[in-house]
Image: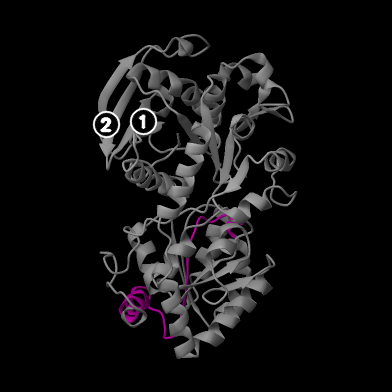
Amino acid sequence: MASEVFPFSRSGGLGDVLGVLPEVLAGQGAQTTPSMQVTVVSPWYGSLAGQPTELWRGVLPELTSGPAPIFEVRVGEIVRSGVQYLFIDLPEFDRPGLYFDDDVHRFCLFGRTVLSVLHQIGVVPDVVHGHDWQSGLVVAYAHLAGLKTVFSVHNLQYQGRWNMEEAARWTGLPQWTLGPDALEYHGDLNLMKAGLTFADAVTTVSPTYAQEITTPEYGEGLQGLLIRLTVEGRLSGILNGLDQERWDPRTDSDVPQFGDPAGKAAATALLRKEFGLDDAPILGVVSRLADQKGIDLLIEALPELTPHWNVVVLGGGDPLLTAALSGWAQHPRVAFVGGLNEPLAHRIYAGADIFAMPSRFEPCGLSQMISMRYGTLPVVRLTGGLVDTVPADIGFRFADATPQALSAACAEARAEYDRPDVWQARMERAMALDFSWQGPAAQYMALYRRLGR
């Protein structure tokens, strides 16, 4: 269960994960006896990129009461690469875009429908796996129904909170579940806490993040619960993989294709020409513009960086960060493009020399994996999945979330760049790394089997 699934819906890394993991699981499950069926359930957004075949239409009694009753629910299906994708059509999701201010209400409705919809179409799950707070209520319902459950935390910062007095009637759950031992958190309904509390197993998207979220610095107020889950053996980290077919410099149609460091020069030349950059090496960034991502640290470091680097940034988000980068784009060595632009993202990953991720926290991160696939060496803060994926002999790592620490790591990278043999060796090691989903999928498969016993 997830709020987004690439290529049908996507706003970030969650959609990317759900775009690959289910199909790899289906491939591995097909080799077992009996074979495993993977079903993915997600909302049928008004802007869904795909045309599901209507599978069922009818009334779910649990939605026909309340201030805004829903008398008809529609379910669509797309089958792809051995996976059954089900899309639940509710009036609240029939609008362009994915996320809005009323999402807690919307995903409470979604959570209440999932098991009923599966029952209507004859799907009986052995294990229910929910992703992030939007599926927290699904996990609670599955637990109460006696099903085995897994809940994956992709970003603990976003928790699906709403005033309990108003939200309590949205869940349809028994009153006892709305107390501090379950869904209540400082007077609010908390759907992230619902998933954490009721899941038989909780995973995060990297081993280091699983450790970090048990501390006050990263626990977002839930560290006490997460410590308890660790003690009980219910919390673990499984590192995300990468769609290595989508992100492959040898076949990428958006860039001059290459398979080794020597071939990368054409991609760098193209990026340099596109933005009118001089012959200084290129630092690339493709990111949400948010404090979490440390973009403010990058902006503060630009006076130290621009004498040595061209800087190309693609991203959207915080208006203040957007305005600051737009101002810096007047500098001859700084280029900024706002918003989402996947072909340009490919060109930056392929054409930059280093890729900066000064994140304050990073549950896993995919950009550092992508950049290394393209021989672009990452400069990363030592947190979360960046610790688990960027070896010290490939990337450049720093500990403190400060502009000075970022600048120092970039200075180290600049010194290495001036040693071509050393730089090429780092690039070769980066491009040889294996970030496929086969290993992580096998870990999930083992977890499902353990729960299913």
Q: Is residue 360 above or below residue 82?
A: below
Locate residue 114, reporting x and y percent.
Answer: 44, 24
The answer to whether residue 12 shows anywhere in this view is no
Q: Is residue 195 above or below residue 217?
A: above
Q: How many marks?
A: 2
Task: Give the image's coloring scheme.
Answer: one colour
Check contact, mark 2 vs mark 1: CB within 8 A: yes
Q: Mark 1 is on which residue type?
A: Trp
Res. 24 visible in picture: yes
Query: In the rendered structure, does residue 187 fall within the stretch colored magenta?
Result: no
Residue stretch rendered in magenta on the structure:
264-293
Among the two numbered marks 2 and 1 on one chain, the one whose residue lies closer to the N terminus:
1
Asked whether 40 or 172 is in front, the reply is 40
- Which amino acid does the dot numbered 2 rest on? Pro
The residue lying at 42 percent from left, 27 percent from top is 125
Residue at the spot of label 2: 52
**In the picture provided, is 258 more to the left or to the right than 139?**
left
Residue positioned 37% across, 71% down in the render:
350
Label 1: few (<14), some or many (≥20) within 10 Å?
many
Q: Which residue is pictured at 49% across the width and 25% down the height?
A: 111
Q: Is residue 214 above or below residue 242?
A: above
Determine which of the numbered discs, if any, sits on residue 44 in the image: 1
**Relative to residue 404, is residue 308 drawn left or right?**
left
Residue 76 appears in which quarter of the rendering? top left
As helix, strand or loop, the secondary structure at mark 1 comes to loop
Residue 205: x percent and y percent? Answer: 54, 50
